[in-house]
Structure formats: structure tokens, C-alpha cells
Image (cartoon, rainbow, N blue to C red):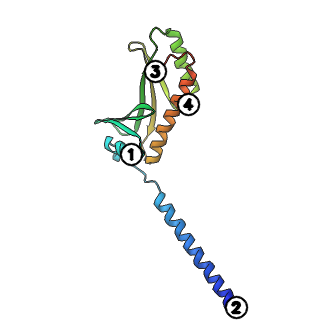
Amino acid sequence: MLTKTIIKIMRTIKLTLVFIAFLLTSFVSHAQKLVTANELTPQFLKETFDNAYIEVLEVKDTYVKVKDTYTIFLDIDDKKRFVTLSGTYNIKAGANKSDIMNLVNKINSEVALIKVYYSETSNTITYYYYFWTEGGFTQKSLIGSLKLYKEALNLSLDKDTGRLIQ
């Protein structure tokens, strides 16, 4: 009877050790690598978005253009402190300037994360979001910021009840 108890205890210990080993290896294999700002290049952005199944439309020396519902430009800061996510959209021809400015102010005050600017000369509205890379970041956080930017765009379009943004 004592040997049966010892055998049970040994099996329990063995299973516990196997389970702990499994947990440790699964945490290590899913850990995100901290990317330094020095590693930030257009090619790195391209690979990151390709791996996330986000369509890469264009790669240039200082920016990458992707399409994930919206066309989004990702510009790398000269000092690699941040990546700017941006997009420019036309305003409906003949729209009243005060209506446009009211919409811009409404979006800027009610939609977090983004900043919106209106260009009267081109009759466009431009969205900006800054993803800080200084101090390091993960590819997952970069993809997450793109998703948040898209959500902010969706929220801003909900605010555009006059359908000024084309």
C-alpha cells in the first residue's frame, strides 16, 4: 500500500514537472521581441504588415503605404522617435467652411488618439496619429495602433452626419 502511494506521488510530480515545462516553453515562444528605434525601416514595416496579412501598396525611403479598409501612410520620423499614421480625404465640393470647421473641431474634441486638420486650398481633411517608437516597441503594438487608427477613423465618420468627408 505504501508503494502504491509513492508511485501515485511520483506520477503526480512527474505530471506537474511536464506541465510546468510546457508552460515555460509556451510563454517563451509567444514572447514579443522588443524592437528598437534603430531597427525601424520601411522594409521592417513592410515585413510587419505582410506578416499580419495587411496589404502593402507602396514602400519608399521614408514611408510605407498600406490598405486595411482605408489607405494609410506610415511615415518614419527622421530621428525614428515615432511613426506617423495618416490619411487625407476630400471634402464634399461646395461644403460650407463653418460646417467643415465645426466637424473638424467636433472630431478633435470627441475622438481620441487622432488629430484632424483641414486644408482650405486642397479642400481636404487629413488625419494624424503618432505611434511612439522611442524606447522600443513590439510588432504587435504597431499592428494594434493601426487597428486603433482605423477605429478612430470609423468614429470620426460617425460624427460626420452631414457627410462632408468623401
Q: Position of residue 164 (x, y in %)?
A: 50, 16
- State the separation of the CA atoms marked 2 and 3: 79 Å
Q: Position of residue 68 (x, y in %)?
A: 44, 35
The residue at 48%/39% (across/down) is 145
| First in sequence: mark 4 vs mark 1 | 1
The residue at 71%/91% (across/down) is 1
Reading the image, the residue beneath label 4 is 112
Front residue of 54/19: it is 54
| First in sequence: mark 1 vs mark 3 | 1
Quarter residue 64 falls in: top left
Quarter residue 102 falls in: top right
Tell me the number on the disc at residue 2.
Answer: 2
- State the separation of the CA atoms marked 4 and 1: 25 Å
Q: Nearer the viewer, mark 4 or mark 2?
A: 2
Image side of residue 80 versus residue 149, left or right: left
| First in sequence: mark 4 vs mark 2 | 2
Q: Is residue 145 visible?
A: yes
Q: Nearer the viewer, mark 1 or mark 3?
A: 1
Reading the image, the residue beneath label 1 is 48
Q: For the residue labelled by badge 3, is the local secondary structure a helix, a strand or a loop? A: strand
